Amino acid sequence: MKTIGFIGLGVMGQSMVRNLMKHGFEVQAYTRTKEKAAALLEEGVTWCDAVQDVCRDADAVITIVGYPSDVESIYFGEGNILDSAEPGTLLIDMTTSSPKLAERIAETAIERSLLPLDAPVTGGDVGAKNGTLSILVGGGEFAFNKAKPLFEAMGQSIERMGYAGSGQYAKLANQIAIAGIMMGNAEMLAFSKRAGIDPEALVRTIRGGAAGSWTLENLVPRMIVEDYAPGFFIKHFIKDMTLAIESAHELEVTLPGLELAHRLYSILEKNGYGENGTQALIEYYLHQDV
């Protein structure tokens, strides 16, 4: 496996492409805004003008785009991946998307002798840059084993969760956990600031105990200095939580904590924070009139 088609060069996608290239893969890429690809093109990525071109002569096509509607468009819309990829090609959607859509893609792909996987990731911009993403995979075992060198180039913790859609369900479960963790850390910080405690000293002290977490290490320091640059956009987290709530309703599971987090983040989005990182949740707790 040598040539990889890649669609989606956002915060995550750009770093993932660089890690693929570091491991010797040739990458041909497409994204709606060519300017986003400028640095990568200078580094050796081949630009494609359309989805069909990305699929040409590719051993695998990887997609990581914004929303389920974007996924549906590139897999089922005009000039789509399913019509353009050659039999035997790996199709790996790494977008956090709908489990039902992943099942639909897989069903159509298998009918056309393609190898589909849904493989959303977690680990944020830091994990993407460092090649330490956690990758949650749904799909057949043969396709999973064939794709492993690609996953190992981009991630560190890689697990096949089951058949089509299972990767998406696992990622939504991850987002449910993150929603609660984000609220807990924002509330901890708001409370400690109001109590007059030095937040940096507090973080240094509690990081080795039960409150220690990736979020405490990586996002709380950004909260403290009001650095809301996006490692993961609030607007995309709201999308993920919406998908999780919809899936929970289908599964007849009640998730009040997730519903509260969704409400708080939606308030922030309505007040102009959608393009900020998820750590901007602290703004709700510090300024509840946002």
Image (spheres, grey):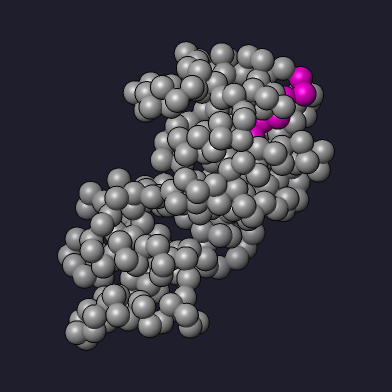
Q: Residue at x 72, y 17 (%)?
A: 86
**Left or right, residue 197 beside residue 1:** left
**Residue 213 appears in the figure:** yes
x, y percent for residue 280 = 29, 59
When asked about the image quadrant of residue 2, the answer is top right
**Residue 31 appears in the figure:** no
The C terminus - image quarter: bottom left
Residues 234 and 99: in front is 234
Residues 154 and 187: in front is 154
x, y percent for residue 252 = 62, 63
The N terminus - image quarter: top right
* Residue interval drawn in magenta: 87-93
When asked about the image quadrant of residue 82, the answer is top right
Q: Residue at x 48, y 17 (%)?
A: 47
Q: Is residue 205 magenta?
A: no
Q: Where 34 sits versus 127, above or below?
A: above
When asked about the image quadrant of residue 146, the answer is top right
x, y percent for residue 191 = 27, 81
x, y percent for residue 242 = 47, 52
